[in-house]
């Protein structure tokens, strides 16, 4: 049974899917993603053999044509035995974007989820240590959001200046 | 008349002058290399360009042994406290070269995380343009520092605070009009370098 058939059987109507140049994509919209994501990922790992989480990243669809949800968190999975790949895109919405953490399935998701949280502000429920990973801990915004200005809100100026006579 | 034909075997000078002469030929750089400028800095120290010809080949990775900080490369916001700590750990007298477009002005990285010129946060003596600068340009900057060392010598922070006029190399000693000199702090909302456009 193929991966898609397995998923169709277990989660009928739970997701939409498409294929582009041989890449299978599974989309979970924001209403279903919160409840269904962990179950779907567990199924992919245990039953379909996707034992490797290649990448975990996020896309901000703010002002994107025909987009209905704002944040799409993308999970790129690989089956190391067969080489099969699959992309799962789970959507989350403002004002409090949240998804279940997949840390328990793939420990490698730890820092990647922290990065997505840092850059986009998507929270991962069940993550053991959800802190900022790149920006300083006192940083207030999430800089890769589309509504964040490229030059920031002046955070890069807020340090003490050391003059010659002080140092 | 009697002594004019003889070679003098003594020289009357100030102790400061001699000390500065020695000091300027023995600069110990602290390589604060964060990006591609650091590669040029290494090339400058290597045999082809050989910064040892100018007496500053002794690069030390401990700021406590150095008196010339070379900031080579872009500095991000998160790095600023580190840079300031290293600067303050260096014993006086000390000088700073801002090497490359990124360290001097942020370069092409006009983003939320990149510092728009390290001179906002630490004092800088010589700026080196270029992306990255040629090793010759860095050597030129070292020569400029040497010129400055020769003139200002072992001035420390308190003495510096007492001085008023600019005492750098003559070619750089240009008075800037006060309205042009207001570059920091910038406007926090728009994050531009200037508070208001210059006319």
Image (spheres, rainbow, N blue to C red):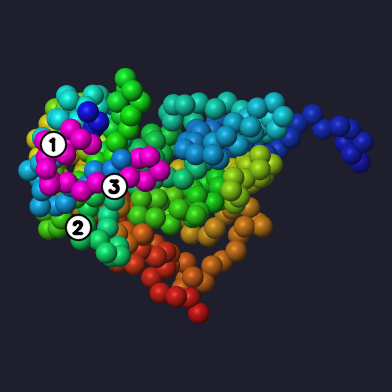
* Real-space Cα separation, disc 2 to disc 1, in angstroms: 26 Å
Q: Nearer the viewer, residue B37 or B169?
A: B37
| Mark drawn on residue A146 | none
Is A13 colored magenta in this rendering?
yes
Which of the two labelled residues, at mark 3 and mark 2, occupies the earlier sequence position? Answer: 3
| Mark drawn on residue A69 | 2
Q: Nearer the viewer, mark 2 or mark 1?
A: 1
Q: Nearer the viewer, residue A131 or A58?
A: A58
Q: Nearer the viewer, mark 3 or mark 2?
A: 3
Are labels 3 and 2 assigned to the same chain? yes
Q: Secondary structure at mark 1?
A: helix
Total tally of numbered discs in the picture: 3
Check disc 3 and report the residue beneath it.
A18
* Real-space Cα separation, disc 3 to disc 1, in angstroms: 17 Å
* Real-space Cα separation, disc 3 to disc 2, in angstroms: 17 Å
| Residue range of the region highlighted in magenta in the rendering | A4-23
Check disc 1 and report the residue beneath it.
A9
């Amino acid at each position: 049974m193929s991966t898609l058939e397995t998923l169709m059987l277990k989660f009928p109507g739970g997701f939409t899917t498409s294929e582009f140049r041989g890449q299978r994509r599974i989309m979970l919209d924001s209403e279903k993603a919160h409840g269904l994501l962990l179950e779907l990922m567990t199924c992919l790992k245990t039953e379909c053999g996707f034992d490797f989480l290649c990448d975990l990243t996020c896309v901000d669809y703010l002002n994107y044509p025909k987009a209905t949800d704002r944040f799409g968190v993308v999970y790129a999975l690989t089956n190391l035995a067969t080489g099969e790949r699959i992309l799962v895109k789970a959507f989350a919405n403002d004002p409090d974007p949240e998804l279940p953490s997949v840390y328990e399935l793939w420990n490698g998701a730890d820092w990647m989820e922290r990065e997505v949280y840092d850059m986009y502000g998507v929270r991962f429920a069940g993550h053991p240590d959800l802190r900022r990973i790149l920006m300083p801990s006192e940083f207030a915004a999430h800089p890769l959001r589309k509504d964040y200005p490229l030059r920031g809100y002046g955070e890069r100026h807020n340090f003490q200046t050391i003059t010659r006579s002080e140092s | 008349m009697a002594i004019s034909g003889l070679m003098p075997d003594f020289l009357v000078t100030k102790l400061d002058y001699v000390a500065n002469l020695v000091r300027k030929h023995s600069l110990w750089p602290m390589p604060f290399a964060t990006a591609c400028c650091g590669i040029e800095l290494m090339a400058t120290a290597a045999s082809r360009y050989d910064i040892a010809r100018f007496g500053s080949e002794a690069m030390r990775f401990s700021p406590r042994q150095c008196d010339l900080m070379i900031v080579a490369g872009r500095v991000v916001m998160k790095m600023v406290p580190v840079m300031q700590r290293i600067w303050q750990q260096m014993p006086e007298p000390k000088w700073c070269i801002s090497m490359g477009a990124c360290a001097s002005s942020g370069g092409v990285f006009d983003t939320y995380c990149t510092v728009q010129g390290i001179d906002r946060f630490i004092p800088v003596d010589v700026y080196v343009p270029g992306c990255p600068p040629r090793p010759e340009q860095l050597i030129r900057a070292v020569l400029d520092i040497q010129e400055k060392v020769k003139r200002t010598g072992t001035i420390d922070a308190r003495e510096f605070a007492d001085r008023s006029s600019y005492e750098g190399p003559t070619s750089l000693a240009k008075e800037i009009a006060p309205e042009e000199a207001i570059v920091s702090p910038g406007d926090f909302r728009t994050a531009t370098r200037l508070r208001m456009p210059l006319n």
